[in-house]
Structure formats: C-alpha cells, structure tokens
Image: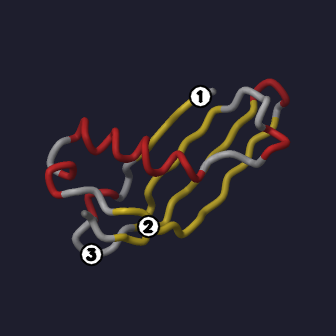
Amino acid sequence: MTSPITLTVRIGNAYPQIGREFTRVETVTVDAPAAETMADPDRLADWARDTLLDFTGEGPEYAATHGVYEVTVTAAPEGYSDLVGLEAYAEG
C-alpha cells in the first residue's frame, strides 16, 4: 500500500458547446504512485488519469454537457518532484 501525498494541481474544465471555461488551483491529497509506477511513463500516465481526473468537473449542472478536462501537477513533495508537470486529460 502506498502512503498519501499532497500535490498542488491546476485544473481546467472547458465546456465548448456552451462556451464556458474554468480554471482553478487546488491542493489535493492522493495515494502516492508506487515506485514501479514512477519508473514507467505509461503506468504513471495511467496513475494520473485514474487519480487526478477525479478532481475535475464543475458540478451537477454541467453533468450532461460535453466537457474537456485537464489536470496538471504544479507542486509535489520531496521525493516526488518527477510528478511536477505531469498531466492528465479526458473528454466526455
């Protein structure tokens, strides 16, 4: 089991059909990626997608609207500096 870490992330949510975009910076606590995940770019991208995209969205009023979601790690604790700049992206 991995221990939790605190990251600073920039979250961007865009809803092109209605012309709305939102950006915010948040501090989030997540389970740290395992050492073997950190060493594998594909696994790290999967970790970012599975872990960080949970923080996107603007609430139930946008749930039925097509959205474009992006999360970028902007700060990470010592030992996890390789996470800075990591991005996760999704549409739906």
Task: Identify the residue position indicated by label 3 in the image.
Answer: 78
6 relative position to 39: left or right: right
The residue located at (67%, 52%) in the rendering is: 23
Report, in whole angstroms, how far the alpha carbon at label 1 lies from the one at label 3: 31 Å
Residue type at mark 2? Leu
Residue type at mark 3? Glu
Residue 2, percent from left and from top: 27, 65
As helix, strand or loop, the secondary structure at mark 3 comes to loop
Residue 72, percent from left and from top: 47, 51
Classed neighbour count for the residue bearing mark 3: other residues with Cα under 10 Å, few (<14), some (14–19), many (≥20): few
Q: Quadrant of residue 35?
A: bottom left
The residue located at (51%, 60%) in the rendering is: 9
Measured along the vertical axis of the image, is residue 56 above or below residue 73?
above
Report, in whole angstroms, how far the alpha carbon at label 1 lies from the one at label 2: 23 Å
Measured along the vertical axis of the image, is residue 77 above or below residue 51?
below
Classed neighbour count for the residue bearing mark 1: other residues with Cα under 10 Å, few (<14), some (14–19), many (≥20): few
Q: Are marks 3 and 2 in contact (CB under 8 Å)?
A: no
As helix, strand or loop, the secondary structure at mark 2 comes to strand
Residue 86, percent from left and from top: 37, 49
Task: Identify the residue position indicated by label 2 in the image.
Answer: 7
Q: Quadrant of residue 21?
A: top right
Nearest to the observer: residue 29 or residue 39: 29
Nearest to the observer: residue 34 or residue 25: 34
Q: Quadrant of the N terminus?
A: bottom left
Q: Quadrant of the C terminus?
A: top right
The residue located at (67%, 42%) in the rendering is: 13
As helix, strand or loop, the secondary structure at mark 1 comes to strand
Residue type at mark 1? Glu
Q: Are marks 1 and 2 in contact (CB under 8 Å)?
A: no
The label number, if any, that marks residue 91 in the structure image: 1
